[in-house]
Amino acid sequence: MKFIELTLGSYIISHGYDNKNKEILQHVNSDTFSKKIVPISRIKSVSDKYVLTDYADGRWIYWEYKEHYDDVKKALV
């Protein structure tokens, strides 16, 4: 299994959808960033601000990250 080290901060947990098909989100704010080792297989997408990963019980997490987008892209490609 391959991993990437990322500096992650605040995040948003997607718990699924309600009966009106609206996404149920839980915002968790952090004042600091911390380094984490993330399995590349859990990463679903990367944007300028967030890394989307899968989580327990079918949930998803949008992690805010500190690295530059191009550096993350190079590490993953």
Image: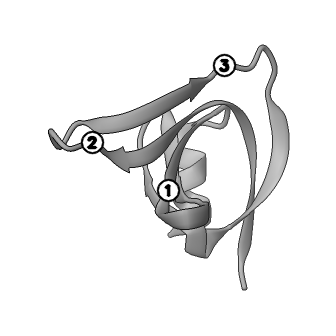
Answer above or below: position of 63 versus 57. above
Looking at the image, which is closer to me, 18 or 36? 18
**What x and y, as percent, mark residue 38?**
72, 61
- Mark on residue 29? 3
Q: Mark 2: which secondary structure?
A: loop
Quadrant housing residue 10: top right
Measure the C-alpha gap from mark 1 to mark 2. 13 Å
**Label 2 Cα neighbours within 10 Å, binned few <14 / some 14-19 / many ≥20:** few
Looking at the image, which is closer to me, 23 or 67? 23
Measure the C-alpha gap from mark 3 to mark 1. 18 Å
Q: Which residue is drawn at 30% across and 39% down?
A: 23
**What x and y, as percent, mark residue 54?**
53, 61
- Mark on residue 18? 2
Name the residue carrying label 1. 59
Q: Residue at x 20, y 44 (%)?
A: 19
The amino acid type of the residue labelled 2 equals Asp
Reading the chain from its start, which is encountered first: label 3 or label 1?
3
Q: Nearer the viewer, mark 1 or mark 2?
A: 2
